[in-house]
Amino acid sequence: MKDASPSILKDHFLIAMPHMDDPNFAHTVIYLINHNDQGAMGLVINRPNGLNLADVLEQLRPDSAPSVLCQSLPIFSGGPVQTDRGFVLHPKGPHFQATVDLGELSLSTSQDVLFAIAEGHGPASHLIALGYAGWGAGQLEAELADNAWLTCPADQAILFETPYDQRLGAAAAVLGIDLNLLTAQAGHA
């Protein structure tokens, strides 16, 4: 009998296959924060939403001008769920009012992490996102079975050091794959 429990992909990348036509996920790479038999949660790491940290801080602290540094820190569209909620993915270390340890990484959801980044004493490496990607029980497994995603272990260099527009290709390269050479067609022998 086949084991029906999901393979746990926490701390992995989901790499959208070239034929992915869902506009929320086409050409994306997602860092999986959590994955268990109840579902999965992740952040899209290669799709900036057009805002920067200065834009967000102007809403949170309208009486304080954000530093020039904040204008160069992009905000990512983390996914289509709760797009008004912020998430900061960063290496394990500093704790803020709402920080969850994920192993080598942490996820902070409180405003104090944004203020610390703006003031230069927050985590040096970080990814700031609005919204997240979520799957119910069995949903991600079904998408994997339909060949919608490739998976590979997450790599902090891709998360924090690779330019966002190169992250999809870099994640696929971990598997030795060039996404431009893949097709949605399946062959049968």
Image: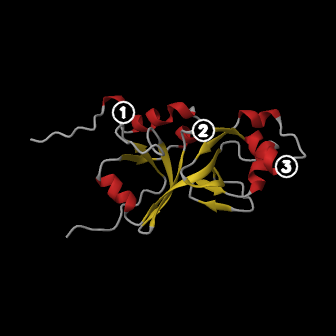
* Residue 178 seen: no
> Which of pointers 3 and 2 lies earlier in the amino acid sequence?
2
Percent of width and height locating residue 6: 36, 64
Between tags 2 and 1, which lies in front? Answer: 2
Residue situated furthest left in the rendering: 189
Percent of width and height locating residue 108: 67, 56
User: What residue do we see at 75% from left, 49% from top?
Assistant: 114
Q: Helix, strand, or loop for circle 1?
A: helix
- Decide: few, some or many residues near mark 3? Use Cα within 10 Å; few <14, some 14-19, many ≥20: few
* Residue 1 seen: yes
> Which residue has dot 3 on it?
61
- Decide: few, some or many residues near mark 1? Use Cα within 10 Å; few <14, some 14-19, many ≥20: some
Q: Nearer the viewer, residue 9 or 147?
A: 147
Q: Quadrant of residue 179?
A: top left
Alpha-carbon distance for marks 2 and 1?
21 Å
Alpha-carbon distance for marks 3 and 2?
22 Å
Q: Is 140 positioned to the left or the right of 90 in the image?
A: left
> Which residue has dot 2 on it?
48
Q: Helix, strand, or loop for circle 3?
A: loop
> Quick check: 13 above or below 47?
below
Alpha-carbon distance for marks 1 and 3?
42 Å
Q: Nearer the viewer, residue 88 or 49?
A: 49
Disc 1 marks a residue whose amino acid type is Leu
Q: Is 138 positioned to the left or the right of 84 in the image?
A: left
User: What residue do we see at 41% from left, 60% from top?
Assistant: 8
Q: Is 122 positioned to the left or the right of 81 in the image?
A: right
Residue situated furthest top in the rendering: 180
Q: Helix, strand, or loop for circle 2?
A: strand
Disc 2 marks a residue whose amino acid type is Pro
User: What residue do we see at 44% from left, 69% from top?
Assistant: 38
> What number is the disc on residue 179?
1
